[in-house]
Amino acid sequence: MLVNKKDSHGNLLHKITLQYEPETYTSFIPNGEMSLPPKDRLIIALRQFKTENKTFTFKQIEGCLHGVSTSYLRRLLCTPPFEKLLIKSKLNGGATLYNVDGSL
């Protein structure tokens, strides 16, 4: 069990039940027990793109958030803190590329 003891903004989960996999030495959240909200899953995906210093398209973000509608994801990207963190660049005739600028 992962317990959060410090949360100055009150927006984090208090407890997360984890399951340990001894073969791979990893802990994970079992399917069906708990699902993170789409905003938290988006933050995790954006942190991953930022650590890899990678540009990405909307389709790639959408692929990281299974079960979230396209319209909801577009609205979520226009709300704080995402609206100020993402830099958009439009290629001529191609998809909009995003890059994370700032800390999550």
Image (tube, rainbow, N blue to C red):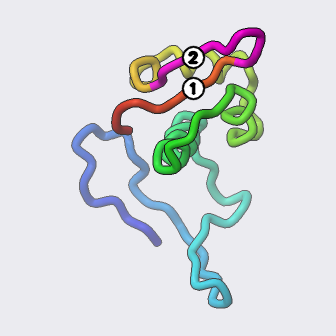
**Circle 2 residues within 10 Å: few <14, some 14–19, many ≥20:** few
Q: Nearer the viewer, residue 13 or 62?
A: 62
**Above or below 81: residue 4:** below
Point 27% across, 60% down: residue: 5
The type of residue carrying mark 1 is Tyr
**Above or below 2: residue 87:** above
**Where is residue 13 drawn, in percent x and y?**
43, 50
Instruction: Count every numbered label the image shows and give the total.
Output: 2
Question: In the rendered structure, does residue 93 fall within the stretch colored magenta?
Answer: yes
The local secondary structure at tag 1 comes to: strand
Label 2 belongs to which residue?
89
**Circle 1 residues within 10 Å: few <14, some 14–19, many ≥20:** some
Label 1 belongs to which residue?
98
**Where is residue 93 drawn, in percent x and y?**
77, 10
Q: Choose top left, top right, bottom left or bottom right for residue 91.
A: top right
Q: Which residues are magenta?
A: 86-95
**Where is residue 3 drawn, in percent x and y?**
38, 65
Relative side of 93 to 104, left or right = right
Q: Choose top left, top right, bottom left or bottom right for residue 22.
A: bottom right
The local secondary structure at tag 2 comes to: strand
